């Protein structure tokens, strides 16, 4: 099933922060992981991801460093900061509230949010 991009655009920052909460990642790795975890519902292009990462870095939500990938290539890795973890929790709470309200309007359809 295809999902309207406008439904997913507001959650992109939250999803990126969630990925980084689990482990440090480089950009392409985030794109692949997001697609895999969402069964290809969330597909980001590099041209969408990197401006978000740059903005999060400027805001102090994430930091970047150079490291070697599993293949031995030098990559720019991103790491969530304490400030970023707080923002993630806020975004997650907003999303939970929003999803609960949508669920109620739709008539109590059950969705698991975790």
Image (cartoon, rainbow, N blue to C red):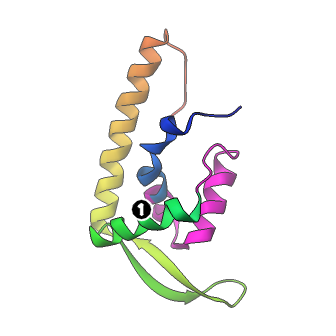
Give the percent coordinates (x, y) of residue 99: 43, 28
**Number of numbered tags placed on the structure image:** 1
Give the percent coordinates (x, y) of residue 60: 28, 70
Asked if residue 76 lies left or right of residue 68, the reply is left
Name the quadrant containing residue 79.
Answer: bottom left
Give the percent coordinates (x, y) of residue 111: 55, 26
On screen, residue 24 above or below 95: below
On whether residue 20 falls in the magenta region, the answer is yes
Say which quadrant the N terminus sits in: top right
Asked if residue 98 lies left or right of residue 109, the reply is left
How packed mark 1 is, by other alpha carbons closer than 10 Å (few <14, some 14-19, many 20 or more), is: some
On whether residue 31 falls in the magenta region, the answer is yes
- The kind of secondary structure element at disc 1 is helix
Residue for point 39% across, 34% down = 96
Q: Nearer the viewer, residue 55 or 33?
A: 55
Give, as a single range, the part of the protein colored magenta.
17-44
Give the percent coordinates (x, y) of residue 93: 34, 39
| Residue position for label 1 | 52
Q: Main secondary structure of the magenta part?
A: helix
């Amino acid at each position: 099933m295809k999902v309207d991009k406008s439904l997913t655009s507001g959650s992109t920052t939250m999803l990126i922060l969630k990925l980084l909460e689990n482990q440090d990642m480089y950009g392409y790795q985030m794109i692949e992981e997001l697609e895999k975890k969402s069964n290809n519902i969330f597909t980001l292009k590099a041209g969408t991801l990197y401006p978000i990462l740059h903005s999060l870095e400027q805001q102090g939500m994430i930091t970047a460093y150079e490291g070697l990938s599993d293949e031995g290539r030098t990559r720019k890795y991103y790491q969530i900061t304490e400030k970023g973890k707080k923002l993630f929790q806020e975004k997650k709470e907003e999303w939970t509230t929003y999803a609960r309200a949508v669920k109620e309007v739709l008539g109590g359809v059950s969705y698991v949010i975790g």
